[in-house]
Image (spheres, rainbow, N blue to C red):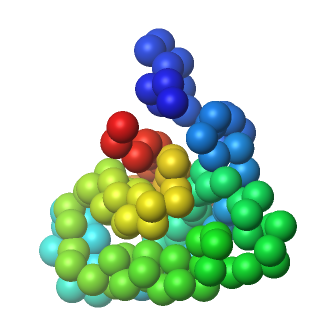
Amino acid sequence: MTAWPPVGGSPGADAPSAAAPDRIVLTGLRVHGHHGVLPAERELGQEFVVDAVLWVDTRQAAANDDLAATVDYAALAQTLAGIIAGEPVDLIETLAHRLAVACLGDGRVARAQVTVHKPAAPIPLPFTDVAVSVTRDRPA
């Protein structure tokens, strides 16, 4: 597998992986967490919205119609929710990294891209969303 992202390039949710040409996508997972640098964020918490894209070879699962041969997205959602609701961190960059590492915990996942949205970020101007996306590959 080549390194991702390519030097000078940026990761994209549609980037193919030779080892895992298919994707499982979980979009809009909403969980209350206490992440942030401000005391009020830590005390009161807020809703975080997470999207995860996993590059997985699903051919065996499809051929055998077998959940055990693929990533169980319900179990994945529970794992990610536990991290979001768990130990607070200052930065959503740190949270996104932890979530991506958890996605790679399933040996069938070749690459994971996680986006953490913080729609209630403490910004004193009108805005729609703040998000950080990270892409991590399984170590070679």
Horizontal placement of 11 versus 91: left or right?
A: right
Q: Would you say 41 lies left or right of 15 here?
A: left
Residue 16 x %, y %: 68, 35
The answer to whether residue 5 is seen in the rendering is no
Of the pair 117 and 101, the residue shown nearer to us: 101
In the rendered image, is residue 13 in sight?
A: yes
For image coordinates 44% across by 76% down, the residue present is 80
Q: Quadrant of residue 137?
A: top left
Residue at position x 34%, y 77% in the image: 83
Residue 133 vertical position relative to residue 65 in the rendered view, above or below: above
Identify the residue at horizontal 58%, vertical 62% (top origin).
51
Q: Quadrant of the C terminus?
A: top left
**Residue 71 in the image, given as x and y percentages of width and height:** 60, 71
Seen from the viewer's position, the closer of residues 11 and 124 is 11
In the rendered image, residue 47, in percent from the top left (x then y), is placed at: 46, 79
Decide which of 109, 35 is in the foreground and name it: 109
Q: Is residue 122 above or below residue 133?
A: below
Q: How many dots with numbers?
A: 0
Instruction: Write down the quadrant of residue 97 in the picture.
Output: bottom left
